[in-house]
Image (cartoon, helix red, strand yellow):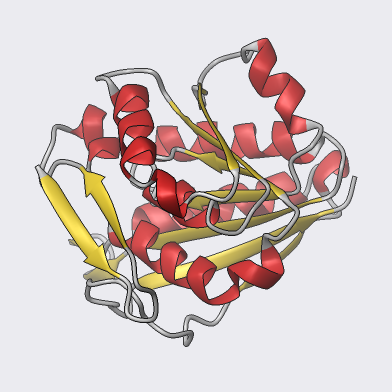
Amino acid sequence: MYKRFIVINFLNFICSEHSYSTTLDLVGRQIWRGALLLGDFLLHYGSSLLQDHTVLELGSGVGFTSIVAAMFASEVICTDIDVGGILELIRANAARNYKLLKANFTVLGLDFYAHGWCPNVEAKLTNVTVVLVADVIYDNDVTEAFVNTLQRILRTPPDKTVYIALEKRYVFTVADFDSVAPCYEYFLQCLQKAQAKPLDSQWEVEQVPIDFPQYFNYERVKELVLWRIISKC
């Protein structure tokens, strides 16, 4: 199935094949609002933030955010776990939008749970200066593995800037007798633990205002947030 997200201030649109619903293990085949928020951010600031940079996206899903980044960057490495044909889907979506892509575009497998990465990923990290992440915070085990992966990446020179977009998902708990966002709170706890480690104590973590223009068709709900991490090696 195809869905076209019209860009208001461009003459082109991004065409993406994706699923509207999936099982939990294949959530990457959907486009989530965090990816669209990050896409808006990149469209608005990409010419200044990404020009001449090498960009790595983690948990890329269908590749939507990487495609937006590739309109401005010099190189984009789009990664996700190699299951359910997701890497082939990313390559197909990149091919559909080849006229928009300025960057060299590479698709590689990267599993947050893996102890070792393929040599191609390791080699690319030495050039990466910007890391993009959208909507990978939905399960505590995945969150832990993601933050561990982020630590490994940010310990690799050169200095890197990370942008993490996500949607806080609230649930009602009897224990708190209130609506809480447990996965989001756990993510913040994992970040704090990471910063407490000597090798990662130089992280600068801040929330980014999301008052930039909206270019894509989605509801920008108040639960959407964008975080920036600046790491000095």
Confirm whether residue 91 shows in the render. Answer: yes
Image quadrant in which you'd find residue 46: bottom right
- Residue at 29%, 77% (x, y): give it: 220
Image quadrant in which the N terminus is located = top left
Q: Position of residue 156 (x, y in %)?
A: 82, 34
Please state if 196 lies on the left or on the right of 7 as rendered.
right
Q: Position of residue 183 (x, y in %)?
A: 38, 52
Image quadrant in which you'd find residue 39: bottom left
Instruction: State whether residue 77 is above or below residue 34.
Output: above
Q: Nearer the viewer, residue 125 or 74?
A: 74
Instruction: State whether residue 61 is above or below residue 38.
Output: above
Instruction: State whether residue 206 is above or below residue 81.
Output: below
- Residue at 75%, 51% (x, y): give it: 195
Q: Position of residue 106 (x, y in %)?
A: 55, 30
- Residue at 25%, 20% (x, y): give it: 84
Please state if 91 lies on the left or on the right of 175 as rendered.
right
Image quadrant in which the C terminus is located = top right
- Residue at 70%, 71% (x, y): give it: 48
Q: Position of residue 52 (x, y in %)?
A: 75, 54
